[in-house]
Every structure is written in structure tokens, then in C-alpha cells.
């Protein structure tokens, strides 16, 4: 563990040079285990790669590779002026018909929302198709950034019928589905497609990620009790901070 004087954490291991396990893996895996079991708390600063290489008697590229592997897994992050630190906890989301805000709160994260855009207009043909309605029907589109523990985890773009869409104020204070239920609009079923791609420069900037970072994507169409479409969502999530969980059943 880091010492009381806040000196950087130095991994205490013995390198086995006769092992078939690569040297960088012998360093990265014990570090990963300490992060995942909570021994190293978020924000803990690690010794730099030069210090690590000298102390463990490995090459600097080996030490760099070990740390970079954990950065790529989202367990570590590099901050200018602060060095390499343990990342905030990863967000695991169950595959249920709930809002992201509700899931984050239930998991114990502090949350906030930034509303980037809110626009009411007549639906064009493509939007009408997504909502299974007629072109010209009043709709609302809005885009939000969801933050967990002060870090952005998702950019959420939604299309909804104007008749059931929350107000701008409601979107910054409550989860989408909680707001709908408060107005007696009950999300009942949904079709969802999960995918992955690289971030655009704008998306990387919004999510505080590097250029072309890996993103998870979710496209969801949600229906109410009467079978009417009440939401079409296109969402992106930081793969370094976020994952979906699902339960499978045998037939």
C-alpha cells in the first residue's frame, strides 16, 4: 500500500526470469489484481517506469509495456503532472430496462448530467420510422453527457415523441425512465443492439478519452404498455470505464 507520506506505490515482486510468462506480464498482472480487489484505491499514484525498471532490474520498455497494458485495460490512467494513477472504478451495468442514472446511483456512484442539446421539431421521415409514427409528428431530440464520480462515462442521444418527452430541467435532475414513470408513461419492453467502434475526435473530447479510443454503443427502441414507441436512443460509452452485464439461460 502507499505509505503515509504519499510516496508512489512500488510493486513488491520477484521477477522469475526462467518463467515462460513474459516479464511485462509478471509485473502487470499482480498490479491488476491489487487494483481489482481494492487494495490499490482509485487515485493511488504508482512509481514511474524508470524507477520501476531500475528497482525490478528490467528494461524501461518492459516497465512501460506493463503499465501501458493496464492503461489500455482502463485500470490505470496517465495524468500530466501527476504521473500514472489508479483509475476510478469501472461501471458495470446490468442488461435491464432501466436508465443509466438509476443504475449508477444503485451502484453507489455520485452522478451528474450535462445537457448538450434539446430540440423540438416535426419528425422527418427517418425519425418517424424510428418512432413508428407519421412524418411531421412533433418530436424532441436531446443529447446528454452522464458523469459518474466526476468522470464522463456516456454520451446519450435520444429521440422521443414530444407528447411524452421530459423537460430540459427534468433531464438534468432525474433518470429518463423515472421521469416517464412519474408521468404515468411506463417503459415496458425494448429492443437493444450492443456494438463497438472507435471514438471520433469530438466524442473522445467529450468523454476525456484519447483519439480513436474504444467505445461501446447501444441502440435502443423502447415501448410502453400499449406497444407504442416512447424512445429511440443511440448511446456511446467509454469501454475503459464501462461494461454491460447479462444473464443467460439455457433453452
Image (spheres, grey):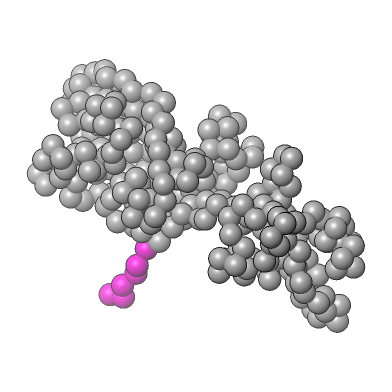
Q: Quadrant of the N terminus?
A: bottom right
Q: Is residue 87 left or right of residue 171?
A: right
Dominant secondary structure, magenta: loop
The relative height of residue 202 versus residue 180 in the rendered view (above or below) is above
**Residue at image x 52%, y 55%?**
89
Name the side, left or right, on which 202 lies relative to 157. Answer: right
**Residue 250 falls inside the magenta stretch:** yes
The image quadrant of residue 28 is bottom right
At horizontal 28% and vertical 50% (from top left) the residue drawn is 98
Magenta stretch, residue numbers: 246-251
Residue 125 lies, with reference to residue 31, above or below; the image says: above
Q: Residue at x 53, y 33 (%)?
A: 206
Residue in the picture at 86% in, 81% down? 18
Outermost residue toward the front? 4
Where residue 249 appears, x then y in whole percent? 31, 72
Q: Say left or right for 8 vs 199.
A: right
Residue 43 falls inside the magenta stretch:
no
Residue projecting furthest to the bottom: 18
Quarter of the image with the C terminus is bottom left
Q: Position of residue 172 (x, y in %)?
A: 33, 32
Viewer-closest of 29 and 40 = 40
Where is residue 67 drawn, in percent x and y? 73, 57
46 in relation to 146, above or below: below
| Residue 72 appears anywhere in the view | no
The x and y percentages for residue 21 are: 77, 75
Task: Inspect this view and state whether residue 231 appears.
Answer: yes
Amino acid at each position: 500500500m502507499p505509505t503515509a507520506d504519499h510516496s508512489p506505490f512500488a510493486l513488491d515482486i520477484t521477477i522469475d526470469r526462467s518463467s515462460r510468462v513474459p516479464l511485462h506480464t509478471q509485473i502487470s498482472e499482480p498490479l491488476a489484481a491489487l487494483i481489482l480487489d481494492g487494495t490499490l484505491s482509485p487515485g493511488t499514484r504508482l512509481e514511474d517506469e524508470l524507477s520501476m525498471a531500475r528497482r525490478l532490474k528490467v528494461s524501461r520498455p518492459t516497465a512501460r509495456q506493463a503499465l501501458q497494458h493496464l492503461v489500455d485495460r482502463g485500470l490505470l490512467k496517465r495524468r500530466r503532472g501527476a504521473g500514472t494513477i489508479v483509475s476510478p472504478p469501472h461501471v458495470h451495468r446490468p442488461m435491464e430496462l432501466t436508465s443509466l442514472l438509476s443504475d449508477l446511483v444503485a451502484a453507489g456512484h455520485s452522478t451528474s448530467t450535462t445537457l448538450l442539446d434539446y430540440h423540438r421539431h416535426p419528425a422527418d421521415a427517418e425519425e418517424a420510422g424510428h418512432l413508428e409514427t407519421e412524418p411531421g409528428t412533433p418530436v424532441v431530440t436531446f443529447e446528454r453527457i452522464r458523469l459518474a464520480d466526476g468522470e464522463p462515462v456516456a454520451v446519450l442521444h435520444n429521440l422521443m415523441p414530444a407528447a411524452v418527452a421530459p423537460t430540459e430541467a427534468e433531464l438534468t435532475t432525474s433518470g429518463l425512465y423515472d421521469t416517464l414513470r412519474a408521468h404515468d408513461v411506463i417503459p415496458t419492453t425494448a429492443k437493444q443492439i450492443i456494438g463497438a467502434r472507435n471514438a471520433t475526435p469530438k466524442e473522445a473530447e467529450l468523454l476525456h478519452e484519447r483519439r480513436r479510443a474504444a467505445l461501446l454503443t447501444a441502440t435502443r427502441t423502447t415501448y410502453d404498455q400499449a406497444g407504442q414507441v416512447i424512445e429511440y436512443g443511440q448511446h456511446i460509452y467509454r469501454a475503459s470505464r464501462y461494461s454491460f452485464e447479462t444473464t443467460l439461460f439455457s433453452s
